[in-house]
Amino acid sequence: MDDLDGRLIDLFADDPRVGVLEASRRLGVARGTVQARLDKLVATGVITGWGPDLSPEALGYPVTAFLTLEIRQDTSRGGHDTVGAHLAGIPEVLEAHTITGAGDMWARVVARSNTDLQRVIDRVLETPAIVRSSTVIALATQVPYRVRPLARVELSG
């Protein structure tokens, strides 16, 4: 990653609908350079998608909660992969991670209301592979999910 890659990432993050030709004009480099850089950033996995960012709140899911799941250690009844596959089938589960510490897996979920959150939790707990869960409801977002600052750290480091 160099400064041009960083500026290219910033440009497309700020204005995702900008075309390659317009990006080359704004950055003052050849169209082929922009396309080659974008292709490289995609091929190396730095850029992982071009879709729109969606707001759960605007879609009607204003409640965010974090579930810490304890997974049954008897692998004949499931395990991390089984639980992950189960969670992937629940639309309100935004992400899930195997973790260290007090639990085995962490999941970020959304719901239409606090009452609806109970439905989501019940759905998560439908698999016998989960022994128990604890839930923390988010009150406000101080720092939203972000990755762009890492590209700048890479450039300065």
Image: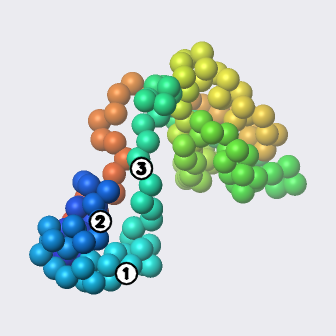
Nearest to the observer: residue 23 or residue 108: 23
Q: Secondary structure at mark 2?
A: loop
Residue 46: where, in percent of width, then height?
39, 70
Looking at the image, residue 26 sits to the left or right of residue 115; the answer is: left
The tag on residue 40 is 1
Horizontal side, residue 57 vs residue 140: left or right: right
Residue type at mark 3? Pro
Going by the picture, which residue comes out furthest to the top?
A: 115
Q: Residues within 10 Å of mark 1 (few under 14, many from 20)?
A: some
Q: Is residue 155 visible?
A: no
Instruction: Tell me the amino acid under the disc marked 1.
Output: Lys
Q: Which mark is residue 52?
A: 3
Q: Is residue 12 visible?
A: yes
Circle 2: is it few (<14), some (14-19), or many (20+) Cα within 10 Å?
A: few
Circle nearer the N terminus (2, 1): 2
Upstream in sequence: badge 1 or badge 3: 1
Residue in the foreground of this view, choosing between 146 and 83: 146
Residue at which label 2 appears: 19
